[in-house]
Amino acid sequence: MNILSGRLGQIEIDPAAILTFGDGVIGFPDYKRYVELGFLEHSPLKLLQAVDAPELGFIIIDPVLFAPDYRVEITGEDLESLGASDPSELVTRAIVTIPQDPYEMTANLQGPLLINPRTRLARQLVNHNQDYTTKHRILRGKDAPSAA
Protein backbone atom coordinates (compact mmCIF):
# COMPACT_ATOMS: atom_id res chain seq x y z
CA MET A 1 0.00 0.00 0.00
CA ASN A 2 1.34 3.47 -0.85
CA ILE A 3 0.79 6.53 1.31
CA LEU A 4 2.00 10.10 1.11
CA SER A 5 4.05 11.61 3.93
CA GLY A 6 4.74 15.32 4.18
CA ARG A 7 8.24 14.51 5.48
CA LEU A 8 9.14 11.43 3.41
CA GLY A 9 7.09 11.78 0.23
CA GLN A 10 5.49 8.73 -1.38
CA ILE A 11 6.24 5.58 0.61
CA GLU A 12 5.14 1.99 0.51
CA ILE A 13 3.88 0.47 3.74
CA ASP A 14 2.61 -2.92 4.78
CA PRO A 15 -1.10 -2.53 5.64
CA ALA A 16 -0.50 -4.96 8.53
CA ALA A 17 1.82 -2.35 10.10
CA ILE A 18 -0.97 0.22 10.53
CA LEU A 19 -1.67 1.21 14.13
CA THR A 20 -5.23 2.13 15.06
CA PHE A 21 -5.74 4.84 17.69
CA GLY A 22 -9.41 4.33 18.61
CA ASP A 23 -9.69 7.85 20.05
CA GLY A 24 -7.11 9.42 17.75
CA VAL A 25 -4.19 11.38 19.16
CA ILE A 26 -5.00 14.29 21.49
CA GLY A 27 -5.91 17.26 19.31
CA PHE A 28 -6.46 15.05 16.23
CA PRO A 29 -9.46 12.83 17.06
CA ASP A 30 -10.47 12.33 13.43
CA TYR A 31 -7.22 10.63 12.40
CA LYS A 32 -7.04 7.11 13.74
CA ARG A 33 -4.67 5.22 11.42
CA TYR A 34 -0.91 5.71 11.76
CA VAL A 35 2.27 3.90 10.87
CA GLU A 36 5.62 4.08 12.69
CA LEU A 37 8.47 4.77 10.28
CA GLY A 38 12.21 5.08 10.61
CA PHE A 39 13.53 8.15 8.84
CA LEU A 40 16.97 8.98 10.23
CA GLU A 41 19.65 6.30 10.00
CA HIS A 42 20.98 5.18 13.41
CA SER A 43 18.51 7.39 15.28
CA PRO A 44 16.10 6.45 18.06
CA LEU A 45 13.65 8.98 16.62
CA LYS A 46 10.80 7.61 14.51
CA LEU A 47 7.98 9.19 12.54
CA LEU A 48 4.40 8.36 13.50
CA GLN A 49 2.75 9.17 10.19
CA ALA A 50 -1.02 9.51 9.77
CA VAL A 51 -2.04 7.18 6.96
CA ASP A 52 -4.92 9.40 5.84
CA ALA A 53 -3.29 12.84 6.23
CA PRO A 54 0.12 13.40 4.59
CA GLU A 55 0.67 16.61 6.56
CA LEU A 56 0.12 14.93 9.95
CA GLY A 57 3.09 13.19 11.49
CA PHE A 58 4.71 13.16 14.91
CA ILE A 59 8.33 12.54 15.82
CA ILE A 60 8.35 9.89 18.57
CA ILE A 61 10.89 8.17 20.79
CA ASP A 62 11.07 5.43 23.41
CA PRO A 63 11.13 7.48 26.64
CA VAL A 64 13.19 4.91 28.52
CA LEU A 65 16.18 5.93 26.37
CA PHE A 66 16.45 9.28 28.19
CA ALA A 67 14.29 8.67 31.31
CA PRO A 68 15.17 5.10 32.40
CA ASP A 69 12.82 5.19 35.40
CA TYR A 70 9.83 6.42 33.37
CA ARG A 71 6.59 4.70 34.36
CA VAL A 72 3.02 5.04 33.16
CA GLU A 73 0.01 4.04 35.23
CA ILE A 74 -1.99 1.67 33.05
CA THR A 75 -5.54 0.78 34.08
CA GLY A 76 -7.51 -2.34 33.33
CA GLU A 77 -9.59 -0.25 30.92
CA ASP A 78 -6.41 0.79 29.08
CA LEU A 79 -5.31 -2.84 28.79
CA GLU A 80 -8.73 -3.92 27.56
CA SER A 81 -8.91 -1.16 24.94
CA LEU A 82 -5.52 -2.27 23.60
CA GLY A 83 -6.34 -6.00 23.63
CA ALA A 84 -3.67 -6.70 26.23
CA SER A 85 -3.78 -8.66 29.47
CA ASP A 86 -0.54 -7.30 30.95
CA PRO A 87 1.36 -3.97 30.66
CA SER A 88 4.49 -5.87 29.60
CA GLU A 89 2.78 -6.54 26.25
CA LEU A 90 2.77 -2.83 25.45
CA VAL A 91 5.33 -0.47 23.93
CA THR A 92 5.51 3.14 25.12
CA ARG A 93 6.43 6.10 22.95
CA ALA A 94 6.58 9.85 23.60
CA ILE A 95 5.92 12.65 21.14
CA VAL A 96 9.00 14.83 20.58
CA THR A 97 9.18 18.54 19.83
CA ILE A 98 12.34 19.61 18.02
CA PRO A 99 12.93 23.38 18.03
CA GLN A 100 15.45 25.19 15.87
CA ASP A 101 18.23 24.17 18.27
CA PRO A 102 17.92 20.36 18.40
CA TYR A 103 19.74 20.28 21.75
CA GLU A 104 16.60 21.87 23.18
CA MET A 105 14.30 19.04 22.02
CA THR A 106 11.69 17.85 24.50
CA ALA A 107 9.34 14.91 24.88
CA ASN A 108 5.78 14.87 26.17
CA LEU A 109 5.92 12.47 29.11
CA GLN A 110 2.44 13.47 30.30
CA GLY A 111 0.85 12.24 27.08
CA PRO A 112 2.51 8.89 26.34
CA LEU A 113 1.48 6.68 23.46
CA LEU A 114 0.81 3.03 24.31
CA ILE A 115 1.02 0.50 21.49
CA ASN A 116 0.17 -3.18 21.46
CA PRO A 117 2.42 -4.60 18.72
CA ARG A 118 0.34 -7.81 18.52
CA THR A 119 -3.11 -6.24 18.03
CA ARG A 120 -1.80 -3.02 16.38
CA LEU A 121 -4.10 -1.04 18.70
CA ALA A 122 -2.80 2.17 20.27
CA ARG A 123 -3.92 5.03 22.45
CA GLN A 124 -2.60 8.19 23.98
CA LEU A 125 -2.92 8.45 27.74
CA VAL A 126 -2.82 11.36 30.12
CA ASN A 127 -0.14 10.56 32.70
CA HIS A 128 -1.07 12.33 35.94
CA ASN A 129 2.31 11.73 37.58
CA GLN A 130 3.55 15.24 38.41
CA ASP A 131 7.18 14.10 38.09
CA TYR A 132 6.72 14.31 34.32
CA THR A 133 6.03 17.27 32.07
CA THR A 134 4.89 17.90 28.52
CA LYS A 135 8.34 19.35 27.82
CA HIS A 136 10.83 16.92 29.36
CA ARG A 137 14.35 17.65 28.08
CA ILE A 138 15.81 14.74 26.12
CA LEU A 139 19.40 15.95 26.06
CA ARG A 140 21.09 17.35 29.12
CA GLY A 141 23.18 19.90 27.24
CA LYS A 142 25.21 20.47 24.11
CA ASP A 143 27.96 18.19 25.40
CA ALA A 144 25.59 15.38 26.43
CA PRO A 145 25.76 12.19 24.41
CA SER A 146 22.83 11.49 22.12
CA ALA A 147 20.21 8.93 23.10
CA ALA A 148 21.25 6.59 20.28
Image (tube, rainbow, N blue to C red):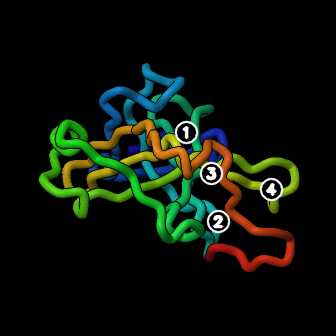
The kind of residue on which mark 3 rests is Ala
Residue depicted at x 86% and y 49%? 100
The residue wearing badge 3 is 107
Residue position marked by numbered label 1 in the rendering: 4
Q: Which residue is rendered at x = 32% and y = 38% of the image?
A: 20
Q: Does residue 74 appear left or right of residue 34 in this picture?
A: left
49 sits to left or right of 98: left
From the image, tell me which residue sits under label 4: 104
Q: CA distance from mark 2 to mark 3?
A: 18 Å
Frontmost of labels 2 and 3 is: 3
**Residue highlighted by disc 2:** 40
Front of the two marks 1 and 4: 4
At label 1, counting other C-alpha atoms closer than 10 Å, the crowd grade (few under 14, some 14-19, many 20 or more) is some
For label 3, count other residues whose C-alpha is less than 10 Å away and answer few (under 14), some (14-19) or many (20+).
Answer: many
Is label 3 or label 1 in front?
Answer: 3
Distance in Å between CA atoms under marks 1 and 4: 29 Å
Indicate whether 77 appears above or below 62. Answer: above
Label 2: which secondary element = loop
